[in-house]
Amino acid sequence: MAKPKTFTIQHEKPWDSTFQLMSWWDSEKVRKACVMVVGAGSLGNEVLKNLALMNVGKIIIIDFDRIESSNLNRSVLYRAEDAEAQSFKSEIAARKIMEINPNVRAIAINADITCQVGLGLFRRCDVIIGCLDNRLARLFINRYASRFNVAWIDGAIENLAGSMAVYRLGKNCYECGLSATEWQNIRYRLGCPDVASRNIKYGKIPTTPISASIIAAMQVQEAIKVIHGNEGFIEYAKKFYYEGMNNIAMWVESNDRYDECESHILWQDVIEDEALSHEMTIGEFFDYLEGRFENGLKINLDTELVLEITSQESEKSYDVAVLKTELTDDFLAKYRSELVENFFITRSLTCISRESGLNDYTLKSIGIPALAILSIETKDDVIYIELTKDILKYTILNN
């Protein structure tokens, strides 16, 4: 029997030693960078793999889906046992990229980006990468990345094709480029009176690992430029398209910007307060703020806080206290007496005051996420206050 060979590393080199051969590479900037990746499907897998290989120090992964067997042929980070266990995509992806590169610190957040993620995470990121399949989530990222002047990189794939664009406040705007049909679809999902409408299942889009790898490579390449501050090399006024059947790659002008757009608002003076957390009651929250500001404060909500739902079939009403975006089929199941039973919102609020009768509820219990930034209306102004104490939940951001 042949004697097995033993391999040893004589002089261990830094992970990015090869990258350091590039004259512009800054190891410290990349090591300290924080990147948020929204969506951990086939495109997200490739983005995360590339970020880990590039030695990006902090990675936040946001996805609410579980792994299915259909994901395995397009997702390099997932295995059959992950699908059998129906594991969360974000959790498995975080673990796997840290196995690829032990220098990486990753955090998994099982959440819907449009309603369950505190905006304090947005403002602590150097760049956000979207690996999404719906326009509503893209619109949300565009608006709130703009609030803090954070660049975000959108990617989309279908069949052998894909596209990529980089957006930043003052440069270009995803929202300005939406067509009338796209706006109609977004408004339908936001405004349908049936509270379970957001649970409508949309057809899956056919994708391949080939298109995912090409578009993800472009997204991470642009993210590295953003991290290094190489703004002059970023094509903000153009969108990249790839069509694999005919091997066509091209840049197309896409510099749509309109003055009256909700995505062109910058929040410059967010107040950080380490005494505030989403774990505190609404009464405690008002007690604290009224000691610093004045009485008569109101919390402005981005979406309705539903206080009562009524069955269309039985006309029976139920008291609840939940954001409209949280009215999922799983939530409504405990109120259904029939297999098919539709509910409508019959009482709701768009702002909360001390007189709303909710003082014993915690902010968390009504759907306010950790590290949220709340819009507070005073007698004379609107101020933005971050629940900064919640930063303790995100260990990778604490150092």
Image: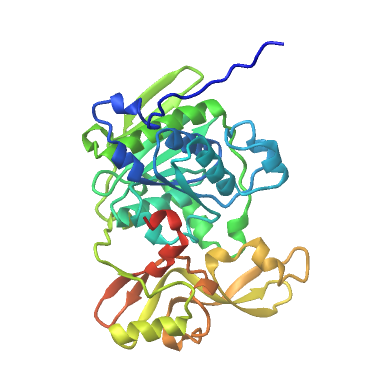
How many circles with numbers are drawn on the protein? 0
* Residue 367 drawn above or below residue 263: below
Q: Is residue 161 left or right of residue 261?
A: right
Instruction: Name, please, the residue furthest toward the right.
Output: 338
The correct choice, above or below, for 376 with respect to 251 in the image is: below
Would residue 264 be found to the left or right of residue 65 on screen? Answer: left
Q: Is residue 120 left or right of residue 203?
A: left
> Which quarter of the image is occupied by the C terminus?
bottom left
Quarter of the image with the N terminus is: top right
Residue drawn at x 40%, y 33% as measured from the top left: 54
Q: Position of residue 14 (x, y in %)?
A: 37, 32
In front: 147, or 96? 96
Residue beneath the point at 50% across and 87% down: 357
**337 or 79: which is nearer to us?**
79
Q: Quadrant of residue 291?
A: bottom left
> Residue 221's quadrant in the figure?
top left
Q: Residue furthest top?
A: 2
Q: Is residue 393 left or right of residue 386?
A: right
Q: Position of residue 375 (x, y in %)?
A: 35, 71
How is the model colour-coded?
A: rainbow
Q: Is residue 18 above or below residue 299?
A: above
Image point (26%, 58%), residue name = 266
- Residue 165 screen position, x and y as percent: 36, 37
Q: Residue at x 55, y 40 (%)?
A: 96
Is any atom of residue 160 visible in this view? Answer: no
Q: Position of residue 256 (x, y in %)?
A: 29, 42
